[in-house]
Image (spheres, coloured by chain):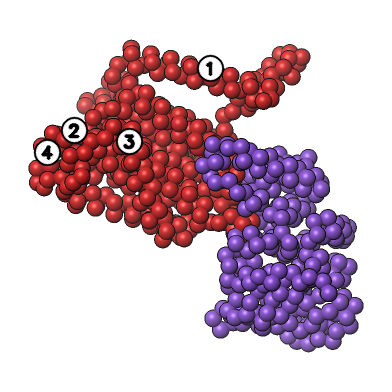
Amino acid sequence: MTKVKKSSMLLSCLLLAALVSLLAYIDGSASSYIVRITRLCAINIVLALSMNLVQGFTGIFSLGHAGFMAIGAYTVALLTIPVAKKETLFMLEPLIAPFNTLTLPFGAALLIGGLLAAALAFLIGLPCLRLRGDYLAIATLGFSEIIRIVITNAQSLTNGAQGLKSIPKTANIWWCYGIALAVLIFISLLISSSFGRALKAIREDEIAAESMGISLLGHKMLSFMLSAFLAGVGGGLYASYIGTIGPDVFQISRTYDILMIVVMGGMGSISGSVVAAFLVTIGQEWLRVLDGPLPFLPFWPENGVSGMRMVVFSILLLIVILFFRNGLFGHREITWSAIGRRLSALAGHHKDGEVKAHE
Amino acid sequence: MNKRVLEVNHATMRFGGLVAVNDLCMHIDHQEIVALIGPNGAGKTTAFNMITGVYTPTSGSVTLNSRSITGLRPDRIAHAGIARTFQNIRLFKSLTVLDNVLIAQHLRLTSSWPAAVLRMPRYRRENEQMYRRAEELLTYMGLWDVRGEIANSLPYGMQRKLEIARALATQPVLLLLDEPAAGMNPAESAELTELIRGIRDRFHLTVLLIEHHMDVVMDISDRIYVLNYGSLIAEGTPAEIQQNEDVIHAYLGGDDDEA
């Protein structure tokens, strides 16, 4: 192993340790409100990374994310709600077998949710992935809506519009960050592999990629199914996080929320998605102040203007798009060697002698 | 006789009422350099697209090393051993020079994606092999020093070379070059001619090229096929083609040349 690799491995371990201690501190000492937002950040990282895989790295303009999230969320809900609770929940029509008597551990339910989402992605992908650009976006958007409408109407499976309550809130800070980290590592390894390069080639130029022997449908399907799997897992985490789900939770606006994170961070940047997931999640909460009364503004209505934060948020997003056309990171990534170069460049201004030591 | 690499048998490409290529018959032997020429709109690129699977011929067949590749998808044809460059350069623009050449080797990867993600030993070996071959190819093409550059930022001539390097990285038996000398000055064209000969010898390749620069065509080709209005009007050595009445007529004479 080279010296650079060794030191970046060491730095990564240190960072991980710091992160774990920070999370332990938040989990133990911070208010439950802060803990909730911290968990939501991790869930949004999972969702953003999964969307970035198709949108940013493969160049597939898919807008079906809310649908895949819904599959994961409902699977987790149906497999983890205690049997006694299910009986009281399904008042109009009883829950069909085997779900009425079956409960599984949270981890297994998440996995199954992801797998079901991936299986559905395969079926949706067969016709849709032959389409390009806007057509593909519209088709996937349509399928996402179909999933939601099926959920609304499959009373004996999903409890329809009443939704599902009392989902065990197993997804604590460790579940959320454990999975977020696993997804982060998985995506990084995938993208830096030969398969990741092939996906990027498809994004760059489909015709050239195909002439270089890359099977378009095969690789798009791989990316689409993996993304759906991760979206399903993210949806499952989300279900456990909010505790109550219904068809309304998975409207198209959910897809746009994630898309916003991906675009803001940079299509095709893993670091960008992670950073933007924090920025957007925390920002949306932090700007809540704007919904309430603002006493220092004399002309402001006494009870505040509800929804004001979204106006301000939209303006901020516009600014990002205007000044960072490719998102905050573009295609760039944060790596230890990149940080090292920055630092040595900075140090270079003061003492030239030590520049080499950092490399 | 030499081994026959490519054979096009009575291939016709029809788009609705338009016959872009009509009953094309051609063959290329091992390590030959063959040019396909003709006025604009003669159907040269359509012929290329039939060979590389972009279009499926309306009728007729294409065989590579006596194996039919008619109607196969472009990626399968690349697997079979045909690599190409494009008339208007199609690099993976925002990726590095090195990545461009690595991507072209993806088709020879035997590891599955989980093995790649888990960095299994076989994948590691294959990946190292890819880097080694990329280094070898880029060094040969004089592009190793710019391996870290974004493809789009290279000067035009280097982009052309990179496209050839990328095509070679797929380990083809037949290389198709669509106007490789387009936009080059005479000195650059001469260099290109040497380069094509060089790669033919080094990689034991067979080359089919479309070209408009007649000095390049006459210099490099073992044989020439001439298309006009989708039909083959002549075939022969450069000397024969230069004497051919029909060819001269198609290029210079008559009132039907500006098609």
| First in residue order: circle 4 vs circle 2 | 2
Disc 1 versus disc 4: distance between alpha carbons? 48 Å
Relative side of B115 to A23, left or right:
right
Residue A218 visible in rendering: yes
Query: Percent position (x, y) of residue A162?
Result: 16, 42
Residue of label 1: A14
Q: Name the residue rendered at 60%, 44% in the picture.
A: A194
The numbered disc on residue A82 is 2
| First in residue order: circle 1 vs circle 3 | 1
Label 1 residue SS: helix
Relative side of B34 to A104, left or right:
right
| First in residue order: circle 3 vs circle 2 | 2
Identify which amino acid the numbered label 2 is placed on: Pro
The tint of chain B in the picture is purple
Relative side of B16 to B152, left or right:
left
Q: Name the residue rendered at 50%, 32% in the picture.
A: A185
Q: Answer yes or no: do the residues labelled 4 and 2 have beta carbons within 8 Å?
A: no
Disc 1 versus disc 3: distance between alpha carbons? 31 Å
Identify which amino acid the numbered label 3 is placed on: Ala
Relative side of B51 to A175, left or right:
right
Please tell me whether residue B183 is drawn above or below residue B251 in the rendered image. Answer: above
Identify which amino acid the numbered label 4 is placed on: Glu
Q: Answer yes or no: do the residues labelled 3 and 4 have beta carbons within 8 Å?
A: no
Pick the front one: A13 or B114 = B114
Q: Name the residue rendered at 90%, 78% in the picture.
A: B239
The tint of chain A in the picture is red
Query: Percent position (x, y) of residue A39?
Result: 35, 26
Q: Disc 1 sits on a residue from what chain?
A: A
Residue of label 4: A87
The numbered disc on residue A108 is 3
Q: Residues within 10 Å of mark 4 (few under 14, many from 20)?
A: some
